[in-house]
């Protein structure tokens, strides 16, 4: 599946949340296109195979599959 570039503002927001170690909840689509959510803090943001991902609670999420972010 081709990666769809996310907006710069979303990427900047994710970087800010990662640096500040804020607790967040992310709703996202899994590789099976099912909606899921995870709560925690972003451990890393990285590129792999021409796509961008974040790591939260041991879960690797493609940035273009994020549906919403809630800050706590």
Image (tube, rainbow, N blue to C red):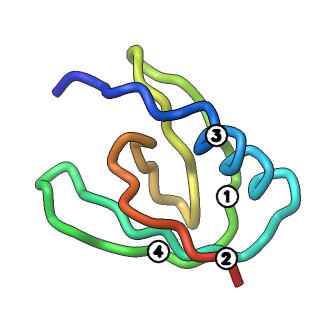
The numbered mark, 2 or 1, whose residue comes first in the sequence reads: 1
Q: Secondary structure at mark 2?
A: strand
Q: Circle 3 sits in a helix, a strand or a loop, which is it? A: helix
Residue 67: x and y, percent? Answer: 36, 60
Q: Nearer the viewer, residue 12 or 60?
A: 12
Image height check: is 23 above or below 20? below
Q: How crowded is the residue under tag 3: few (<14 C-alpha within 10 Å), some, or many (20+)?
A: few
* Residue at the image point whose x is 67% and y is 76% from the top: 71
Whole-number angstrom distance, CA of label 1 to CA of label 4: 11 Å
Foreground tag (4 vs 2)? 2
Query: What numbered label is drawn on residue 11?
Result: none
Mark with earlier residue (4, 2) = 4
Question: Which callout, 4 or 3, points at the residue further toward the start of the chain?
Answer: 3
The residue that appears at 20% across and 49% down in the rendered structure is: 31
Does residue 60 lie above or below 36 as drawn? above
Is label 1 in a helix, a strand or a loop? strand
Q: Determine the residue positioned at 53% across, 60% down.
A: 58
Circle 1 crowding by C-alpha within 10 Å: few under 14, some 14–19, many from 20: many
Residue labelled with disc 4: 38
Residue annotated with mark 2:
71
Do the residues bearing badges 2 and 3 touch, measured as CB atoms within 8 Å?
Answer: no
Q: Position of 12 compared to 66: left or right?
A: right
Q: Residue 12, position in %: x, y?
A: 71, 40
Residue occupying the far top of the picture: 50
Secondary structure category for the residue under label 4: strand
Q: Which residue is mark 3?
A: 9
Tell me the residue at 61%/31% (across/down). Answer: 8
Q: Position of residue 9 (x, y in %)?
A: 64, 40
Residue under label 1: 42
- Marks 3 and 1, how far apart at CA: 17 Å
């Amino acid at each position: 599946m081709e990666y769809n570039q996310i907006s710069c503002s979303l990427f900047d927001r994710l970087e800010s949340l990662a640096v500040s170690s804020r607790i967040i909840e992310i709703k996202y689509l899994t590789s099976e296109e099912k909606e899921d959510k995870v709560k925690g803090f972003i451990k890393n943001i990285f590129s792999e195979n021409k796509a961008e991902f974040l790591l939260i609670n041991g879960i690797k999420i493609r940035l273009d599959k994020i549906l919403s972010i809630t800050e706590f």
